[in-house]
Image (tube, rainbow, N blue to C red):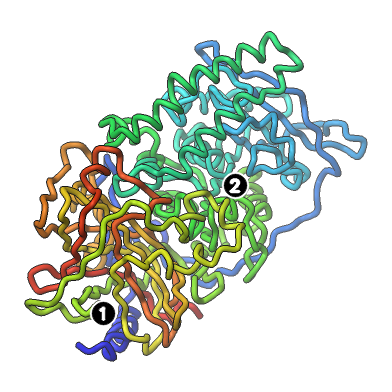
Amino acid sequence: MSKSGISLVLAAAVLLAGCGSSAVPDKASGSANWTTLGTRAQPSRTGTSITRNAGAQWVDYNPPALYPKTVSQGTQYITMPDGTQLAAYVTLPADASGKAAAGTFPTVLIQTSYNGGSAGLGVSALGGADPFIVQHGYATVVVDVRGTGQSQGNWEAFGATEQGDYADVVTWVTQQSWSNGAIGVYGVSYLGITAILTASQNHPSVKAAFPIVPIGDGYRDIVFTGGQVNPTFIPIWLGLVSVLGLTDPILLTDPQVGVATVLQHLLSAVGNFQVPTILQALAGNPGTAYDGDFWRLRSPLETDGKITVPTFIVGGLHDLFQRSEPLSYESVKTQVPAKLLIGPWTHLQAAMGDGLPVDGVPPLNHIELQWFDQYVKGLNVGADKLPNVTQYVLGHGHYVTATDWPHPQAQAQKLYLRGDKSLSASAPAAGEASNTTVQEPLNGLCSISTSQWTAGITGYAPLPCQTDDSVAELTDVVYETAPMAADTYINGPIEVDVWMSTTASDAGLSVRIDDVDGSTVTALTNGIQTASLRAVDASRSRMMNGLMIQPWHPFTQASVQAVGSGTPVLVPVEVFQTSALIAKGHKLRVAIGASDLPQGVPPAPTLLNSLLGALTIYSDAAHPSSVVLPVVPATALQ
């Protein structure tokens, strides 16, 4: 097929995708044309497509404050069964004089690793109480998790002991004189992860959850995406927790207690968790570099299916946990009231709900209040009638609502990477050319990955290369469609199946998906994959109308497959979900290279096996490299 026919084929496929979608009520086990993505413990299952609530619209819930002020109590300590004391900071509604209001209140519980006692900024994203929430009749309790902030113990980032503490903290809250026994768990990032893990424990006092940018899979989302260790955010994050654990105000107010706590944190960081974990990852230690119990325990997707309380999940298209935020929603949507909001955000932008209100979507704390008023206070305030799924659509420039994720009208469409560097709906012929690039580990130094994997920190510098992929793809092999004959809407995960060989003994693959308008190459999403970890568990991978669209790689030591020099092998690459409109006249681009340094670098043994090689991408009948896209009718944007 000629290039001019490519967009016509896609447009026709889009129109066909709109036919025959069935109306399936929530919890009615309606069969969809896709399967779910499995977990370590659970294989894929037939998907359920929710079409309920189709006419839902956003409203701004902003009732008058119930109390004029807030008041914070002094630092308190919660004693765990093993004697470890966790620091807790309580903020209560107050009258005009600043005195704590009489009566009992529902509680918003936040569990943080970022020293809640040092937050003091009234910003719940940092571990402080939000005055807006407190003044609307909620107590807020912020607790430093074990081994962080002003709490005693050793930190192990969502380890078994820390997760065991969550239930004891909930029980403590219910025993306080100001508590009415009803709790909503809330938080951003680490705080959102503790919220969703606490929700999965189903303590009877926890009535609802509102996690913002929570992780889903500790291994696959960020730390070892594609089998490559994250060299940017993870060291920054571990260092941040360590520093905040050493800046303990009790050093001044109660040195006898403060010195002992800080010393315990320091010894834990150097000898027990932070420093050893980084070194083990870089060295390729099997217990860390491969998937296993360490990562299973730190992956909420393994327990999300146990959640029985209404859950509202917020994510970002360029967030650290971009991959799993819709997966978390999918895990709970048929068992509890659930909503999903995804903005055009990096991690820091999502924490603040950057740009809201817009397109009718209110500020995040207004949504949080409505969610908790309905499901924690038990008021009928319309939270159940909010849109089920709201996503910002790149290239469209607006938030768009839908009844479900995956989108009920999505259809998988395959395009082939052709020898002439085009993308075509027609399979390649025998003898089509291959394309080669150099294997080097430093690509992507200035790209959307730089901003995404520093949590958005570098995104505040106005560098064009952080939004335009032209520089990042200078050494990549680039495949493009012809200009689109009609708007093409992509919504969901993407799979790129690459037939490749290398002159080294291993290789990494970086895949970028772009919207091309003239000379402007707008980054949409990307994925990376180590070739030797290419094995796929089909029973856990996502299928969509007969095509695999989201591979599930085991990433275990037993799954390692030799690559061999010069031998063509098929490497399925998971490209993280997105929502984007490729406008009429624009091109869709798939760029393939050997590295994306801000996102991941192979552990030392794999890196040494991947250096100084040439990477060849095949595009012939025997080796048909391809991309599988989730295409939704563009009319859904209306």
Mark number, residue 422: 1
Percent of width and height locating residue 218: 39, 40
Nearest the viewer among 592 and 147 is 592
Circle 1: element type: loop
Camera-side residue of 615 and 12 = 615
Up-down relation of residue 176 to residue 37 (above or below): above
607 relative position to 196: left or right: left
Q: Residue at x 26, y 60 (%)?
A: 438
Number of numbered discs: 2
Q: Which residue reaches farthest top?
A: 256
Of the two numbered discs 2 and 1 on the same chain, state the one appearing first in sequence. 2
Q: Find the distance from the CA under tag 2 to the CA under tag 1.
A: 52 Å
Residue assigned mark 2: 375
Residue 618: image location, x then y, percent? 16, 68
Q: Residue at x 50, y 65 (%)?
A: 465
As drawn, 535 above or below 416:
above
406 shown above or below 311: below
Which residue is found at the position 47% from the left and 50% from the top? 453
Q: In the rendered structure, which amino acid carries the disc numbered 2?
A: Tyr
Judged from this view, the residue extending furthest toward the right is 97
